Image (spheres, coloured by chain):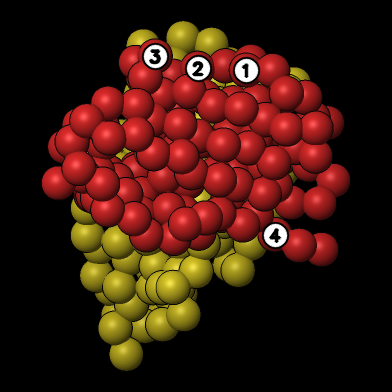
Chain colours: A red, B yellow
């Protein structure tokens, strides 16, 4: 069983740029959620996708957007990057008949200069 | 608003000593709580959930609604328990839910 994979693992951007992060969900999982983890903090919920539709969103501005594809992989897009967007971005997948268990990827570490 | 508080950023114990990682929550609904763990150079993973009432790797956690707590306990800590521990509260259900995480506690078990 293939686990959750994310790309890229590290990237550096400058303020005002745009970034796209990618996630392949675990086999058999149709729900993907994204979390932002700033240094010294716990993961913070950005949004969740279920069967290609966004079905939950945290307290993040509209410049954070996403997609889920028919194969349940997902993208996180962030426009107009700000310094505070520097963080580890975690993708997690789960089944719809879930136990509340999320399966996390290793994350994409974004640095905004 | 829902909130999860882990009051200790760092916790250091000796091997064989009891360990308790504290977690308190604030939530108006019926809480569903989890402990996630991240070992060095590994990804975040589920340790246990309160609904299961199970013991995983010797760890247990009891939901105390009166004290709004979900502390993680182990009677005899092992060096391999050294890791970052996050308490999480589930909001919502079915396919529409999110986890609210605490800031985490770094547990170090010394030989």
Q: Which residue is mark 1?
A: A54
Q: Pointers 3 and 2 in contact (CB under 8 A)?
A: no
Crowding at mark 3 (Cα within 10 Å: few <14, some 14-19, many 20+): few
Against A36, is B40 above or below?
below
The residue lying at 46 percent from left, 39 percent from top is: A20
Q: Mark 2 highlights which residue? A: A57
Of mark 4 and mark 3, the one earlier in the sequence is 4
Q: Which disc is residue B25 wearing?
A: none
Measure the C-alpha gap from mark 3 to mark 2.
10 Å
User: Which residue has dot 4 on it?
Assistant: A3
The reply to the same-chain question for discs 1 and 3 is: yes
In the rendered image, residues at marks 3 and 2 fall on the same chain: yes
Residue B83: image location, x then y, percent: 39, 67
Q: Are labels 1 and 4 assigned to the same chain? A: yes
- Measured in 3D between alpha carbons, the distance from the residue under mark 1 to the one under mark 4, in whole angstroms, is 22 Å
The secondary structure type at the circle numbered 1 is strand
Depicted A22 relative to depicted B60: above or below = above
> In the displayed structure, would residue B73 be above or below residue A97?
below
Q: Quadrant of residue A44?
A: top left
The crowd level at tag 1 (other Cα within 10 Å; few <14, some 14-19, many 20+) is some
């Amino acid at each position: 069983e293939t686990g959750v994979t994310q790309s890229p693992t590290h990237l550096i951007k400058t303020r005002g740029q745009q970034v796209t992060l990618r996630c392949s969900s675990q086999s058999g999982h149709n729900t993907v959620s994204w979390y932002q983890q700033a240094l010294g903090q716990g993961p913070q919920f950005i949004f969740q996708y279920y069967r290609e539709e966004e079905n939950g969103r945290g307290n993040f501005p509209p410049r954070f957007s996403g997609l889920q594809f028919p194969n349940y992989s997902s993208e996180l897009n962030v426009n107009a990057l700000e310094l505070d967007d520097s963080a580890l971005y975690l993708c997690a997948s789960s089944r719809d008949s879930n136990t509340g268990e999320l399966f996390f990827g290793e994350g994409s570490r974004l640095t905004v200069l | 608003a829902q909130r999860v508080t882990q009051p200790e950023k760092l916790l250091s114990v000796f091997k064989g000593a009891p360990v308790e990682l504290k977690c308190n929550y604030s939530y108006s609904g019926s809480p569903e709580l989890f402990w996630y763990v991240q070992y060095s150079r590994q990804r975040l993973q589920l340790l246990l959930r309160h609904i299961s009432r199970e013991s995983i790797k010797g760890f247990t956690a009891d939901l105390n609604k009166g004290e709004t707590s979900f502390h993680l306990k182990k009677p005899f800590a092992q060096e391999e328990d050294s890791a970052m521990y996050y308490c999480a509260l589930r909001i919502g259900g079915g396919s529409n839910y999110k986890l609210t995480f605490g800031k985490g506690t770094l547990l170090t078990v010394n030989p």
